[in-house]
Amino acid sequence: MKQGLFIALVLVLAFVIGWIIFEFFLPDYIKAGGPLVIVLIAFSVMVITFTIERMFALNTAKGRGSVTVFLRKVQQEINSGNIDAAIATCDKQRGTPANVLRAGLEKYKVLKASGATKSAKETMEEMQRAIEESMMLEVPLLEKNLVFLSTLASIATLTGLLGTTLGMIRAFNALAKSGAPDAVALSLGISEALVNTAGGLFTAIMGIVFYNYFATRIDNFTYMIDEATYTMVTTLAEKDSSK
């Protein structure tokens, strides 16, 4: 599914779900927050949706088995000089680490098959360039939709603040009436302010927590790949220089 279509579907379904929850499942004291509660519920649904999508995507990016076991097996094949077996291991594992390591191994295999007389340093630079190009393709896939989590966290805060402001306007309007203040209107205004404040903060907290969680997880993931590729390139370069 294309990214634009996915975002559009999430947006529409989130607001539909928000309206259904608002109309049929919320108590009256939360409904007192007004129509902006529907918007805040929709934002919460979108945060949950993008969170589930990122969890699934990052788990898929790991590949079929344990990443640690995979990296160890590839390194063992490289140490034994069996490049084809290392590439086959990457094909079997799949996922981001396998794709990146495979790019470096394929480049090394092509350089050796071409018969070009390159120094170990030149070989290392060529492999590193291929690995960096592969990383440039893989990392954006890992970070996809994270911007929506951070954006929703910011927008939810502002939406809650808007609801708070509207509620306080209603409350002060009730106090400004001549004679005895309208207690009902005053309480409704305060309820609207507090409900929207709580809803905005709840959604923002979810968005920030999951954004930071995924950002940290992706950083650790890419660091692990960098370490594995550096070890691979260094090992192959040392083997070539010793010949």
Image (cartoon, rainbow, N blue to C red):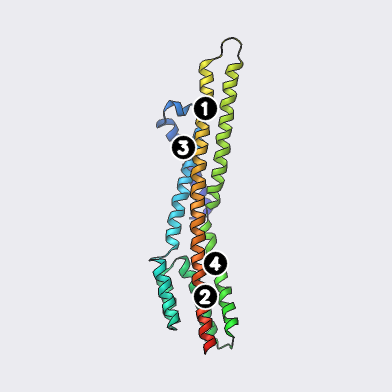
Distance Cα–Cα, label 3 vs label 2: 48 Å
Q: Mark 2 is on which residue type?
A: Gly
Q: Mark 4 is on which residue type?
A: Met
Residue marked by disc 1: 192
* For marks 3 and 2 on the same chain, the one whose residue lies earlier in the sequence: 3
* For marks 3 and 4 on the same chain, the one whose residue lies earlier in the sequence: 3
Residue 216 versus residue 231 in the image, above or below: above
- Quadrant assignment, res 181: top right
Residue 220 versus residue 93 in the image, above or below: above
- Quadrant assignment, res 83: bottom left
Distance Cα–Cα, label 4 vs label 2: 11 Å
Distance Cα–Cα, label 2 vs label 1: 58 Å
Q: Residues within 10 Å of mark 4 (few under 14, many from 20)?
A: many
* For marks 2 and 1 on the same chain, the one whose residue lies earlier in the sequence: 2
* For marks 1 and 4 on the same chain, the one whose residue lies earlier in the sequence: 4
Contact, mark 3 vs mark 2 (Cβ under 8 Å): no
Q: Mark 3 is on which residue type?
A: Gly
Residue marked by disc 2: 104
Contact, mark 1 vs mark 3 (Cβ under 8 Å): no
* For marks 1 and 3 on the same chain, the one whose residue lies earlier in the sequence: 3
Residue marked by disc 3: 18
* For marks 4 and 2 on the same chain, the one whose residue lies earlier in the sequence: 2
Please identify the residue farthest to the top as the structure is shown: 179
Q: Residues within 10 Å of mark 1 (few under 14, many from 20)?
A: many
Q: Mark 1 is on which residue type?
A: Glu
Residue 100 versus residue 53 in the image, above or below: below
Residue marked by disc 4: 135
